[in-house]
Amino acid sequence: MKKAFTLAEIIIALAIIVLSVVFLTSLGMSYLSILNSIRTRYIGLNIAQSQIELAIALRNQQIEKGLSPWVGVSAPGNYCIYFDQNTSRIIAEPGECTTSVEGFRRLISYSDFENPGNSNLTTSRAVRVRSEVYLGRDQFKLDVVLTKWHPTQ
Amino acid sequence: MKGFTLLESIVVLFLFTVAISIISQIYNNLMRSAILAQNYQIALDNFRLGAEKIWNELKNGSNFIPSSNRIEFLDRRCRRVRIYTVSTPNPNIIFEVRGQAAPLFNEELVELESFRIIYDNPSRSGSSYYQIANKVFMLNYKVILKTKTTKIPFEIWQTVAPSNSVLINNPCQ
């Protein structure tokens, strides 16, 4: 009698073939996910850095006007800082920034660096500014400490 | 002597051809993905290098004369720097230091679609440098990252708060 393959042999052979194909396909997909990850990280870090720059520029803008550097952000907490193109000024509004992109959140928080319990930052010598960006599962956080150093302050 | 029938041979050859074509297709896709990812990384690195150069120079610059798509200023060594766009022979940003112009991006990797500068409007009331200096620049880059197989559009905003903008005295006087 002619010898044939058993069901177990066929299943094992098919499983090996399917696994090889799946492995090669997933390898190809992983390259594309790396590509997407590179892009997301660059964009996320750039947004976080931009928020820090806006916070520095806001402080500098207040110095220009002869005001306390923390006017507009005198209470510790979350803020949305943005550049108003109509008035060409930097604006800080309490709360998180609203975005229409799903999974994207950005906010900036202010706190007293030396005394975290201080509720009035106008008396602070140093303020910690934290920039947070959430892009889907990725999150980016950058910190900077801004101090009162300007002669006009 | 026992051999294979014609039908058996044809079936085996057919299955072999199908298997080879599937595997070669997967291999091709794999290689294409790898090359695309590598080229994308190279193009993005070239863009980042250029964009960070502008960011660093603006961060440490002073005496800015901005407009919507070009900016002129003095760098940390008080050399005159101009950043502007050109459309020929290839769209690019030109970085010019003391009259020596050089394209910012490698034209084989990055193609510029548009470059826009948004800036604040200081009060300009007073004689101190911090009263007249720009406090923030927002740069919008729209580029196409070129890979060997495809072109990928990319847009990003960069924000710069120049370090010198709160100095009492002009750093390049």
Image: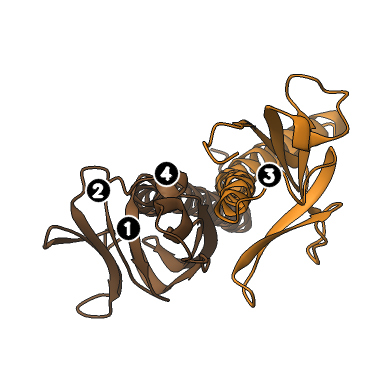
Q: Which residue is mark 3?
A: A68
Marks 1 & 4 on one chain: yes
What element does badge 4 sit on? loop
Q: Is residue B69 above or below residue B37?
A: below
Q: Could you tell which of marks 1 and 4 lies nearer the N-terminus?
A: 1
Viewer-proximal residue among B73 and A35: B73
Q: Chain of mark 3?
A: A
- Circle 2 is placed at which residue position? B172
Verify CB contact (< 8 Å) between mark 4 and mark 2. no
**At which x and y percent is residue B57?**
33, 49
x and y percentages locating residue A139 in the rendered image: 73, 39
**Three-letter code for the amino acid on which mark 1 is drawn:** Asn
Q: Are marks 4 and 3 on the same chain?
A: no
The secondary structure type at the circle numbered 3 is loop
Q: Residue furthest top?
A: A114
Q: Amino acid at mark 2?
A: Cys
Is label 2 in a helix, a strand or a loop? loop
Q: Which mark is residue B167?
A: 4
Whole-number angstrom distance, CA of label 4 to CA of label 3: 16 Å
Say which quarter of the image contains residue A128.
Answer: top right
Task: Give the mark nearest the N terminus, 4 or 2.
Answer: 4
Q: What's the CA distance linking mark 1 and mark 4?
A: 12 Å
Task: Locate residue B109, reporting x and y percent.
Answer: 33, 60
Element under disc 1:
strand
Chain B tint as drawn = brown
Chain for disc number 4: B
